[in-house]
Amino acid sequence: MQGKGVGVMSDTTKYSVCTICDIGCQLRSESEDGQVTRVIAHDNPILANNICFKGVAAPSIHNHADRIRKPLKRVGARGADQWEEISYEQAIKEIADRLKTVVDEYGPESFAVSTSGWNTQTTHSTDRRFMNLLGSPNWISGVSLCAGNTAAVNKLTYGWFPMGDYGNAECIVLFGHNPRKHSWTPIYNQLKAARKRGAKIIVLDPRVSDQAEDCDLHLRLRAGTDAAMCLGWLKVIFDEELYDKAFVRDWCVGFDELKARVDEYPLERVSEITGVEQALIVKAARMYASANGAIIPWTPITDMQISSTSAIRLHSILRAVTGNLDIAGGETLGGFNPGYISESEIALHEELSSEQKAKQLGFEDHPVYTYRVAEMLKEPTEKVWGYPYADIVMGCHMANPSNVFRAMATGDPYPVKAFFVLGNNALMSYPNQHQILKAMMNQELIVAHEIFMTPTAMLADYVLPGDVFTERNHVADSWNWTTRLTLSQKVVEPPPEASSTFKFWHDLAHHFGFGNRFPWDSLEALLDHRLSRSQRTFSEFEAAGFMEAPTPEFRKYEKTGFATPSGKVELASSILKNLGFDPVPYYREGPALSEQFPYAVFSGVREDPFFQTGQRNIAELRERCPLPKIFVHPDDAQKEALEDGDWVKVETAYGEVKAELSVQESMKQGHLRVPHGWWYPELRGKAELAGAFLSSDAVLCSDDDAFLDHEQGIPHFKGYPGRITKIAKPEVFDRVSDALNL
Ligand SMILES: Nc1nc2c(c(=O)[nH]1)N[C@H]1C(S)=C(S)[C@@H](COP(=O)(O)OP(=O)(O)OC[C@H]3O[C@@H](n4cnc5c(=O)[nH]c(N)nc54)[C@H](O)[C@@H]3O)O[C@H]1N2
Ligand SMILES: Nc1nc2c(c(=O)[nH]1)N[C@H]1C(S)=C(S)[C@@H](COP(=O)(O)OP(=O)(O)OC[C@H]3O[C@@H](n4cnc5c(=O)[nH]c(N)nc54)[C@H](O)[C@@H]3O)O[C@H]1N2
Ligand code: SF4
Ligand SMILES: [Mo]
């Protein structure tokens, strides 16, 4: 789509890319007297349905009384939540001085950063640029448990991360993916449209999810067994010769090795592992493989399992062998947008020495997501896509978060003593929250860049106020996942002492003496630089329209080959082999259930009114979901003598969470579903770290080796052993009820 808004836009109505969740709907924002007053749907009918009640609530978030508006410096003990207000200049100077002290004493690798990037919008990889110039490889991100790691693994198979063509696919396969009207609304809308035009939908989900309620086939697999299911599908596809033989012959390597592995998974075995009857597995595999254009959209389910690398590789292999790669109705390999300098280039990965890259935490143990694999893919990536490093979905080539927190906590293998966290509630957003707390308590310098006082920010030495999406200009580049460029316009000024993350890194670089490598004196100057490749300025882009999406080109590999070492689709991965891993995918069973911990716990409930750990302080959203819930099947409730509405605790060998019980037919027997992201802003000053340890899935899930995917070190959030017990309502929740008038 390319074009201008069809409605009449007043000076105070502008296009905004909403960053409340990470799907980035383009909306419109209105303002009056320097305040954003309303966020409304797009004026282009094609985009007008892409809005949810979180987006509409943006003015309540952006104008919230509790928003951090002044830089804060810690005055009490770490975590005591006592602050003095200081100026931005003082904050930046002190932060720079203290970071220099840490780096001088322990080396640049003692500096780690955790971020998510998408919500701050303004970073443009200047964080990586700063770190690469300083010499630190230890950057981590929330997307290590999301599409980021999926992108990294897809590159092993065919050198890029494809995007499914929802508009033309005949069959759509949802591995646990469950978009709803208020959860990733644009994908929900695309699925709705696909159903309407007759596309077949296959859902693989232990529960009867919203998407499963109206699908053509529902396979209720046991949590964490996706890789085994995919091996079963391949068994059917190979045995029945449903694959694209010409594509496999001409464009794939490692077929025989893969086939030998697949033969180890006869359907009896797959059925036993997954708990799904053989006939249904056969039916689904046939439906997928025989469709004329089918997609397996990325799913946040296979990026949090003990067999993550294999499961993601199997999705990529299924796409390839069924001939769905880089065709209309299949999965498009986008590449860099030729008219917009990529974040990969801004990041300057080539400036970080090999010696420092090799110090990246996780480089040895779990290399697939680290610089180790990035270096192995450099040549083919440059040959095919024109630049050696492809940062896709906000964060390739990153350190392993668990290794980073361990180093922060223990000094093993070397001390990490300064930790900056920007637009990310790190304490609750990785596994093993106990270790993260220990890690943060052991720091000499913590800086948080935030809009609200989160439990993570409470642990900082400095909290810098961030700007928000109605207060900044941006050209969103779909994180290189697609080539679309989307306009986001400033509608009001940020609070005077707030900074963009760009400004933060820019100013820090000037204090560190490499300001000449940050030559842009404003965000708009940086946008001008990125757009210069298509001879445009930001103002010209802004004047030209609201969005542009170059027409996709298909089968580009016929001209260039694939960006893998062999130039082919690597069904057996040469990179995995070189690293000493199994080159073909396999299924690994998660930590065993036991008499003591008889249930498979899976986490990640995303309640409609909130994004991840955010928005619990926004009254109009919180009213829709005042408290978290733990979900169980009626049979299990009966077995445990539990009733809907009881207070319960779920325990693992690592921790416990408490919440109210919801008994649901839609749950799968033997499973417990726990929420992600809950803390209680109303408990600030009334409970430790505002209740961050009360109901957070991160206290339940371990990052011991038995819980980690080998290749990437991804934790097993989908089916770890736990138990459930009835408890009296904890007294602390009375304080929550009182504060909320429940
Ligand atoms: N309102 C709202 N919307 C959101 C978000 C939010 O926080 N709030 N977060 C966004 C983000 S970043 C993400 S990543 C997505 C995640 O959103 P979804 O893709 O919808 O993922 P979940 O809701 O975590 O889980 C989806 C389904 O996976 C099933 N499932 C659990 N374990 C397994 C398993 O092992 N295998 C399979 N096949 N299925 C399993 C669950 O039963 C559930 O129905 O949501 C996005 N949308
Ligand atoms: N334990 C556990 N961890 C998980 C997951 C899980 O299910 N369980 N899910 C994973 C997934 S799928 C994802 S996508 C990631 C998400 O990880 P993130 O995207 O990092 O989400 P949050 O950790 O909630 O942190 C977002 C923070 O950014 C702040 N913020 C919002 N807007 C702005 C802004 O404009 N400027 C600044 N400076 N700050 C802003 C919010 O107040 C909030 O505290 O988490 C992953 N981590
Ligand atoms: S789905 Fe909702 S929260 Fe997410 S970007 Fe769209 S409007 Fe914003
Ligand atoms: Mo995510």
Image (tube, rainbow, N blue to C red):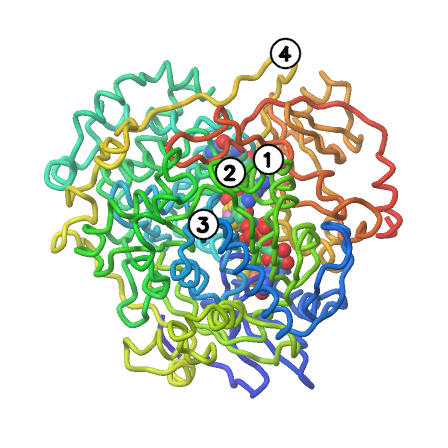
Q: Which mark is residue 109?
A: 3
Q: Which residue is mark 1?
A: 432
Q: Residue furthest top?
A: 595
Would you call the spot at circle 1 few (<14 residues within 10 Å), some (14-19), or many (20 or more)? many
Front residue of this view, candidates 690 and 619:
690
Residue shown at 62%/46% (left/top)? Answer: 440
Q: CA distance from mark 3 to mark 1?
A: 22 Å
Q: Nearer the viewer, residue 70 or 193?
A: 70
Vertical arrangement, residue 222 with respect to residue 733, above or below: above
Residue at position x 79%, y 52% in the image: 684
User: Compared to 233, does 564 lie above or below?
Assistant: below
- Amino acid beneath label 3: Glu
Element class at badge 2:
helix
On the image, the x and y values in percent for residue 541 come to 38, 80
> Nearer the viewer's eye, disc 4 or disc 3?
3
Which residue is identified by label 4? 595
Amino acid on which the number 2 mark rests in the picture: Ser
Secondary structure at numbered mark 3:
helix
Q: Which residue is mark 2?
A: 402
Total marks shown come to: 4
* Residue 590 in the image, given as x and y percentages of width and height: 48, 23
Question: Which numbered disc, 3 or 1, marks the residue closer to the eye?
Answer: 3
Q: CA distance from mark 4 to mark 3?
A: 44 Å
The amino acid beneath tag 4 is: Glu
